[in-house]
């Protein structure tokens, strides 16, 4: 379901759209706090102990869900069970990171090895137009990836890149996006957050996901000069894990991004 102030500004149900608007309205407050990050769709807390569990609870109750980014998995899950009850389900994603030295040469080889079919294009945009943003959001939605708000992809608030693979008819076949969304004085200063890789269901199992992800990582480093890239995937999502590791990122042992979800609703794969 598409909602919002313009054709592509916000995506999701009423609660998710309302949260996206609220996070945008609080963007200056979030940007001033090194332990927080504007995730577009969700507020990110980078160090729950330092931020304070009372503050975290207040934010989670206000928003309905909140993300704890790349935290100690077992320790944090134990604390969450203590805070919210052992019967509560805390979805988490494994964290994968890499340096430019690990990632860029690997990804350059992937991109150069992919032979674009006649008429196809593969490019990255730091300020995509509204139509491109809208197409990427619909492709995200069709593949079970929570679409990113349009202002986020436009680069209105912080550096962002959207990588697009189009066929000869100019149809968006695959896309991926990344942002430099972390505070310069925070624990992830200089890091890139990358993801939202989506491939049209008609074109799966052709290596397009790893190609568009590799292109996005190469171009974002060329443009932003990030020092570490972070991507996330659920442990049982073999396709995503394989795609990420093929691009030179490695799983961070014991680290995960955990979502405190008080709504009972579905977030993203």
Image: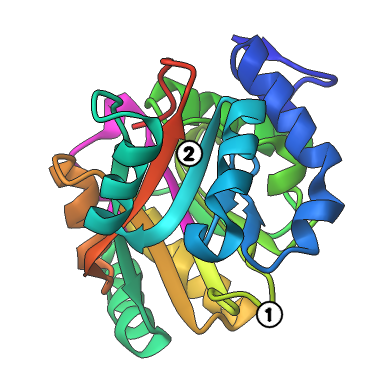
| Rendered position, 139 above or below 160 | above
Q: Which residue carries the number 1 mark?
A: 185
Q: Which residues are magenta?
A: 194-210
Whether residue 115 appears in this view of the structure is no
Location of the C terminus by quadrant is top left
Residue 128 placement (x, y as % from top left): 72, 48
Instruction: Choose mark 2 or mark 1, whichever is in front.
Output: 1
Residue 11 percent across, percent down from the top left: 64, 22
Secondary structure state at the residue bearing disc 1: loop
Q: Position of residue 8 (x, y in %)?
A: 73, 26
Snapshot quadrant of residue 10: top right
- Number of disc labels: 2
- Residue at image location 50% in from the left, 84% down from the top: 227
Estimate how packed mark 2 is, as few (under 14), some (14 to 19) or many (20 or more) residues with alpha carbons within 10 Å. few
User: Residue 199 colored magenta?
Assistant: yes
Find residue 15 and report its image quarter.
top right
Q: Residue at x 49, y 30 (%)?
A: 146
In the shown orientation, is residue 177 left or right of residue 134?
A: left
Q: Residues within 10 Å of mark 1 (few under 14, many from 20)?
A: few
Cα gap from disc 2 to disc 1, whole angstroms: 44 Å
Where disc 2 sits, the SS reads: loop
Give the colour scheme of this rendering: rainbow
Q: Nearer the viewer, residue 41 or 215?
A: 41
Sequence-wise, the earlier of marks 2 and 1 is 2
Q: Kindly identify which numbered label has been placed on residue 168.
A: 2
Q: Are marks 2 and 1 in contact (CB under 8 Å)?
A: no
On screen, 68 above or below 254? above
Name above or below for residue 189 compared with residue 205.
Answer: below
Tag shown at residue 10: none
Q: Report the quarter where the N terminus lies.
A: top right
Q: Identify which residue is drawn at 42% across, 39% down.
A: 259
Magenta stretch holds residue 209? yes
């Amino acid at each position: 379901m598409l909602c919002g102030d313009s054709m592509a500004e916000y995506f999701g149900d009423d609660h998710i759209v309302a949260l996206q608007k609220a996070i945008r309205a609080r963007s200056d407050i979030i940007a001033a706090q090194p332990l927080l990050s504007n995730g577009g769709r969700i507020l990110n807390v980078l160090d729950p102990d330092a931020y304070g569990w009372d503050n975290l609870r207040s934010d989670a109750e206000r928003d309905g869900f909140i993300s704890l980014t790349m935290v100690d998995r077992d320790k944090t899950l134990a604390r969450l069970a203590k805070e919210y009850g052992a019967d509560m389900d805390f979805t988490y994603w494994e964290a994968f990171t890499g340096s430019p030295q690990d990632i860029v040469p690997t990804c350059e080889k992937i991109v150069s090895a992919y032979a674009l079919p006649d008429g196809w294009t593969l490019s990255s945009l730091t300020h995509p137009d509204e139509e491109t943003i809208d197409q990427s959001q619909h492709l995200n939605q069709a593949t079970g990836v929570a679409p990113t708000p349009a202002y986020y992809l436009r680069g209105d608030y912080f550096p962002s890149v959207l990588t697009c693979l189009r066929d000869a008819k100019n149809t968006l076949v695959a896309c991926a996006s990344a942002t430099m969304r972390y505070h310069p004085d925070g624990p992830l200063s200089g890091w890139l957050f990358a993801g939202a890789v989506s491939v049209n269901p008609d074109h799966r199992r052709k290596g397009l996901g790893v190609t568009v992800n590799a292109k996005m990582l190469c171009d974002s480093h060329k443009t932003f000069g990030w020092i570490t890239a972070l991507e996330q995937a659920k442990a049982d999502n073999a396709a995503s894990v394989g795609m990420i590791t093929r691009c030179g990122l490695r799983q961070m042992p014991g680290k995960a991004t955990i979502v405190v979800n008080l709504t009972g609703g579905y977030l993203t794969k």
